[in-house]
């Protein structure tokens, strides 16, 4: 009888030992999981680049008190640049497209009232005066050498280009109003109806600034 009791006690000890091992193993694993969760790095999301405002520079000359280069936000208009240069009382502001968007590196010439001659815009440089109504006044559309500035030309000026009729001229105007100024003459091919062949006929007769 005593031998049977000793066997039962031994079995109980073995059982208690197994339970202790199981409990210890479970607790150890739980501690490892908590430790791993505590060291998970927090990744910070960088601020999107598009939220940063980009500035552009324009050169304002002519009938202004303070001609010079001015820095403005990328979505600024001609009127913002002209006002920064302080237009004179004799400035002919009606000759300007004051609501037009400006582009980086643009020259804005503010004409005097009754003026017929003035500097001619040749790209981003200003040539000698004496070119009549080819004066660049932030939207007249004409440039030196008879080229048409497709960023400022109206429908009549666009129709002087080879192969550009009323419908296509209107699409060019709608495209730049919806997408902003053309950055290069080649961007004209983004307009529906202007392919490589038509652009080849136009490339020497157009410019952007």
Image (spheres, rainbow, N blue to C red):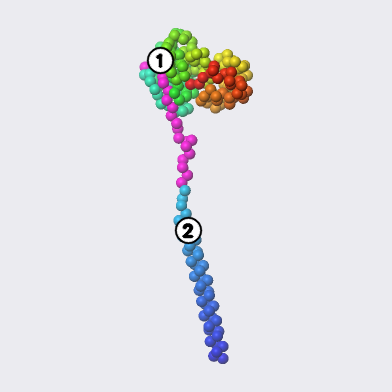
> Which residue is denoted by mark 2 in the rendering?
36
Q: Position of residue 189 (x, y in %)?
A: 58, 24
Q: Is residue 10 visible?
A: yes
Residue 200 magenta-highlighted: no
Instruction: Give the number of the disc on residue 150.
Output: none
* Residue 3 sits above or below residue 111 on the image: below
Residue 59 magenta-highlighted: yes
Q: Is residue 80 visible?
A: no
Which residue: 52% across, 13% down? 146
Residue 21 or 195: which is nearer the viewer? 195
* Residue 113 sits above or below residue 9 on the image: above
> Which residue is denoted by mark 1 in the rendering?
62
Q: Position of residue 135 (x, y in %)?
A: 46, 13
| Quadrant in the picture for the N terminus | bottom right
Are dots 1 and 2 in contact, CB under 8 Å?
no
Q: CA distance from mark 1 to mark 2?
A: 70 Å
* Residue 77 sits above or below residue 157 on the image: below
**What's the magenta region?**
44-65
Q: Earlier in the sequence, mark 1 or mark 2?
A: 2
Residue 113 is drawn in which quadrant? top left
Which residue: 51% across, 25% down? 183
Q: Position of residue 173 (x, y in %)?
A: 57, 21
* Residue 134 sits above or below residue 37 on the image: above
Residue 128 or 91: which is nearer the viewer? 128
Residue 202 or 182: which is nearer the viewer? 202
């Amino acid at each position: 009888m005593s031998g049977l009791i000793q066997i039962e006690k031994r079995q109980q000890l073995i059982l208690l030992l197994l339970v202790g091992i199981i409990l210890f193993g479970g607790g150890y694993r739980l501690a490892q999981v908590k430790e791993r969760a505590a060291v998970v790095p927090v990744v910070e999301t960088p601020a999107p680049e598009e939220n940063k405002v980009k500035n552009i520079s324009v050169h304002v000359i002519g009938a202004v008190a303070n001609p010079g280069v001015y820095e403005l936000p990328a979505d600024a208009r001609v009127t913002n640049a002209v006002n920064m240069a302080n237009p004179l009382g004799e400035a002919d502001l009606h000759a300007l497209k004051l609501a037009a968007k400006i582009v980086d590196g643009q020259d804005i010439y503010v004409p005097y009232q009754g003026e017929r001659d003035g500097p001619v815009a040749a790209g981003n440089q200003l040539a000698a005066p004496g070119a009549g109504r080819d004066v660049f006044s932030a939207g007249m559309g004409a440039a030196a050498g008879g080229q048409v500035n497709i960023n400022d030309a109206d429908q009549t000026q666009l129709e002087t280009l080879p192969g550009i009729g009323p419908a296509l001229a209107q699409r060019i105007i709608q495209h730049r109003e919806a997408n902003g100024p053309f950055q290069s003459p080649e961007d004209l091919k983004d307009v529906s109806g202007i392919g490589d062949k038509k652009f080849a006929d136009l490339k020497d007769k157009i410019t952007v600034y």
